Image: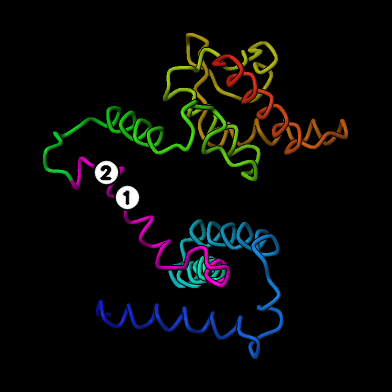
Amino acid sequence: MSHKSTLNNLDSLLKIMQALRAPDGCPWDAEQTPESLAPFILEEACELIDAIEAGQPELILDELGDLLLQVVFLAQIFKERSLFDFHDVATGIADKLIRRHPHVFDQSYNKKTAVELDQQWDNIKRSEATHTKSCMADHLPNNLPALQRAQKLISKASRVDRQTELPEVDQQQLSQMCLPRDDNGNWQPDEEALGSALFHLVKLGHEANLDAESALRKFTQKTVKHLDQERL
């Protein structure tokens, strides 16, 4: 597919969405709002993940289209509100990619290690922030699944050398989980063992009438607030 035909297809997609939202278009599409579309964004993203895990290119292609539709849909709504349009979205992310990869697009930058690149990325993101105080809650979406949000928080704390401020793990309790250890007693979990341990915890929560997603979400949020208060 040529670059020209790609641009034509994109322009056609934008015009189709504009027609769907027009007064003589589709009533359902016309009445949608960013708030009403929000659940579909998460649903389409999850379906794309399922397709990727299934390793089916045709299905991945289809789900990528469904996710792109949500971007086009939202961009059209905000265009109607005279706030921004799809081209602004595309320009914004293109500019961000160049800004956050000076080691690629700026020949004056020397080659960096993976660790240095992570630090550079964090520094650039902080410089882009609309406020000067760096919070652990930054770039930690509330609507992420609880397990993913917790892992993202732990990863972020490690990158800024604040992992020692995270809540301590009760190793005696966790020692009862099915996580393998080496000869020195250190955990060496593989993916299967970790999945088994997590499933076991969810099962224990269910038996105690506790929701694992809610419990982890609340504990993660409590930890985020604690870390941010430490820097006040």
When the figure is inspected, residue 52 is found, relative to residue 108, above or below; the finding is below
Q: Residue at x 63, y 88 (%)?
A: 25
Front-most of residues 56 and 159: 159
Instruction: Report crowding for label 2: few under 14, some 14 to 19, many 20 or more residues within 10 A (C-alpha).
Output: some
Discs 2, 1 touching: Cβ within 8 Å: yes
x, y percent for residue 68: 49, 68
Magenta stretch encompasses residue 78? yes
Q: Quadrant of residue 127?
A: top left
Q: Residue at x 70, y 15 (%)?
A: 173
When the figure is inspected, residue 202 is found, relative to residue 19, above or below; the finding is above
Residue 63 seen: no
Give, as a three-letter code, the residue at label 2. Answer: His
Question: Which range is magenta?
Answer: 76-105
Front-most of residues 138 and 43: 138
Position of 217 compared to 89: left or right? right
Residue on which disc 2 sits = 101
When the figure is inspected, residue 155 is found, relative to residue 15, above or below; the finding is above
When the figure is inspected, residue 86 is found, relative to residue 39, above or below; the finding is below
Residue on which disc 1 sits = 97
Q: Quadrant of residue 120?
A: top left
Instruction: Report crowding for label 1: few under 14, some 14 to 19, many 20 or more residues within 10 A (C-alpha).
Output: few
x, y percent for residue 74: 56, 66
Kindly state the secondary structure of the residue where label 1 is placed.
helix
x, y percent for residue 153: 55, 30
Give, as a three-letter code, the residue at label 1. Answer: Leu
Position of 2 compared to 37: left or right? left
